[in-house]
Image (tube, helix red, strand yellow):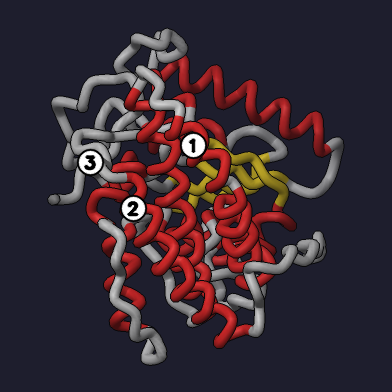
Amino acid sequence: MPFIKRHRAGKAMPKVVHSEPDERATPLCEELLKLPAVQAVVLGGSRYRGGWDNQSDLDIIVVLEEQGNEEENIKTAHLALDELKERYYPGYQDYQHPDHEVVHGHIVVSMEYFQAHRRTQNDPMSQAARQGRIFANKPGTEEKYEHDGDTSNEWELVTLRKLERAADENRSIPSLRMIYGTRRKRELFSYTIPGRTGYWILWCSGSAVMSILGVMYGNRSLVAMAETLKERDPGWNHRFASDLDCLDQYNLCGCELVVTDPITNLDAMWEALETDRDALWERIRELTGYDLNEPAPEISSSS
């Protein structure tokens, strides 16, 4: 099955995909930069690169100075962002409006938080620092917001959280079997929950392996993840039994969902998933000594 373009649950598939960047996003960022507390704005995603549609987020990271009242600065930045979105995307707050999805994708952080999280391979901050367009309040200082090559926070801020998420999803399988066993009339619901969980167990486990290996992952496709493991990990010798193409349909399930070809045999999917999960978890144990069958250690708040 070919890769299916994601779209938001409950909405029709977008009819138009714009190959050029969204021309409204750049002036919006430039206006946002005029706020006194804003040090930089990073624009990323499809509205910066091109390839966006009317269900695409407006991916913006707003970096604030450390001085002053942090809570007040964050509130001010959010209010200003709302006003600017209304100016450049008038009427966007209406759920039926073509530009409604610009409500998503905004992160407002301190300079300390941004600099700590950019020191990874795979945190959104590091991805934005490498791939996004940086608007700095002082021209010529954009370099201080770029990725500096330091990835020392990868384990703490990315890998450990992926491992924790994989274990959490795995613990939910017994309840999902019960949900499926009730055979509710809403078949989409009963397919969706196991599909989402199957997706996240494999994705979080596989992306944790990639982070451990120092590999940057570019999207959330299970098929791409499997290919990366095959190419980049010389110790990986497992052949996936799960239907990764089918599970890719559940990408970001709950926010974005495509189910055009539901899993017809969930029992067989769980059996294949268990084999693939065990192989990934064994590889994690070989690489780090970390056992996903044991309770996850607490994540340190230091950076």
Kindly identify the residue that appears in the image at 64 percent across and 40 percent down. 108
The residue indicated by pointer 1 is: 105
Front: mark 1 or 2: 2
Kindly identify the residue that appears in the image at 27 percent across and 72 percent down. 227
Numbered label attached to residue 5: 3
Q: Position of residue 89 (x, y in %)?
A: 38, 18
Q: Earlier in the sequence, mark 3 or mark 1?
A: 3
Spatial CA span between label 1 and label 2:
33 Å
Q: Is residue 63 visible?
A: yes
Q: Earlier in the sequence, mark 1 or mark 2?
A: 1
Numbered label attached to residue 269: 2
Residue type for callout 2: Met
Kindly identify the residue that appears in the image at 44 percent across and 68 percent down. 206
Numbered label attached to residue 242: none
Q: Nearest the camera: 231 or 275?
A: 275
Q: Quadrant of residue 189?
A: top left
Quarter of the picture containing the C terminus is: bottom right
Q: Is 269 on the left or on the right of 207, as rendered? A: left
Q: Is residue 141 visible?
A: no
